[in-house]
């Protein structure tokens, strides 16, 4: 059973860094419960405001509904007493509804609604899609604005007016005009979070548009750096943000952009580089090459982010 009401959850999440734990897989690409629980225990030992299980970085798009439910339940059991855990929903409308119900049953505090599977859709379809999920759970629901699910300002307002448990808007487009319209129309009724790949790159300018937080994938392997970066963003310390961008984030992007899909692979690569391991990624993603992994490890060390225990 959720600890927070949807309104309380929004208040909790809007003023802290958020992250999506990777899902650990074994050599057969099955969910590795021991490694996943170990990762969750480590991730929840820092000052993160919320963890989203079975999301994009958690390769939720490769999980069966049964696996997704199991992953969320383990996250709640391992980390839920220390930090709010949210689940994810996506795929077909029926699957998203099932994900939502399973997530609440597992004890998650809320839910991120991913875009519907494959097909193009217009605003009425998106409204009905999100509404079905909002009605399926009493926990807070956040929509993910990306790909084929671009919610207009009016649709967001309509969802907010219709469903009390609709609490948040996550964006992965960076469309300033669109975001300005959404924020101006909906104001403090919702909270807003950045969800572009490697969100640190966009965090400072998006703060000016009302996005008080974002999801950090690199928190998975350099949590203290990620938290310091977030603090600098919220303090609007341009010099500190720029220094961290130059020292680590921008060179990291150069490695990430070598191969499509490395946005997740590089996070698991980062864990390997610091002496932790969550296994390989599932197809259609591919693991980093040995060269790319070595370059990532060298960058982490050069940037001074290698944990003391893993220093060489």
Image (cartoon, helix red, strand yellow):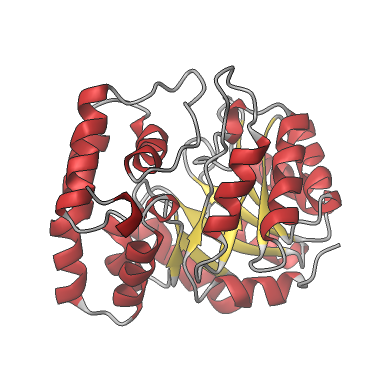
The image quadrant that residue 6 belongs to is bottom right
How many dots with numbers?
0
The image quadrant that residue 292 belongs to is top left
The residue lying at 39 percent from left, 41 percent from top is 267
Residue nearest the viewer, comparing 121 with 108: 108
The residue lying at 28 percent from left, 25 percent from top is 259
The residue lying at 62 percent from left, 77 percent from top is 11
Residue nearest the viewer, comparing 6 with 310: 310
Q: Check the picture and name the quadrant holding the N terminus.
A: bottom right
- Residue 108 position, x and y percent, is 75, 56
Relative side of 145 to 100, left or right: left
- Residue 7 position, x and y percent, is 71, 75
Mark yes or no: residue 262 visible: yes
Relative side of 246 to 98, left or right: left
Mark yes or no: residue 54 visible: no
The image quadrant that residue 268 belongs to is top left
The residue lying at 37 percent from left, 65 percent from top is 224
- Residue 5 position, x and y percent, is 78, 72
- Residue 63 position, x and y percent, is 65, 28
Residue nearest the viewer, comparing 142 with 233: 233
From what the image shows, is residue 214 above or below residue 152? Answer: below
Residue nearest the viewer, comparing 220 with 110: 220
Residue that sits furthest to the bottom in the current view:
235
Relative side of 262 to 65, left or right: left
């Amino acid at each position: 059973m959720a600890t927070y009401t949807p309104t309380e959850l929004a208040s909790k999440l809007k003023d802290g860094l958020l992250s999506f734990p990777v899902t650990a897989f074994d050599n057969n690409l099955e969910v590795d419960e021991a490694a996943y629980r170990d990762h969750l225990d480590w991730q929840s030992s820092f000052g993160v405001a919320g963890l989203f299980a079975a999301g994009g970085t958690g390769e939720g798009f490769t999980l069966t509904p049964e696996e997704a439910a199991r992953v969320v339940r383990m996250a709640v059991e391992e980390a839920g007493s220390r930090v709010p855990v949210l689940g994810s929903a996506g795929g077909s409308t029926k699957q998203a509804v099932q994900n939502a119900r399973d997530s609440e049953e597992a004890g998650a505090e809320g839910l991120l609604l991913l875009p519907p599977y494959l097909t193009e859709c217009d605003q009425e379809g998106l409204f009905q899609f999100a509404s079905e999920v909002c009605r399926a759970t009493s926990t807070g629901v956040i929509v993910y604005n990306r790909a084929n699910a671009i919610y207009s300002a009016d649709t967001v307002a309509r969802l907010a007016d219709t469903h009390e448990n609709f609490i948040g808007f996550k964006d992965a487009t960076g469309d300033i005009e669109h975001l300005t319209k959404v924020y101006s129309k909906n104001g403090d009724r919702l909270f807003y979070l950045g969800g572009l790949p490697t969100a640190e790159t966009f965090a400072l300018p998006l703060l000016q548009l009302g996005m008080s937080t974002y999801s950090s994938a690199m928190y998975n392997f350099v949590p203290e750096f990620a938290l310091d970066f977030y603090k600098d963003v919220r303090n609007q310390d341009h010099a500190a943000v720029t220094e961290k961008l130059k020292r680590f984030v921008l060179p990291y992007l150069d490695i990430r952009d070598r191969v499509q899909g490395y946005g997740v692979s590089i996070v698991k690569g980062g864990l390997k580089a610091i002496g932790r391991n969550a296994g390989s990624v599932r197809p259609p993603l591919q693991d980093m090459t040995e060269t790319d992994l070595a370059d990532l490890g060298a960058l982490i060390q050069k940037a001074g982010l290698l944990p003391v225990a893993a220093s060489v």
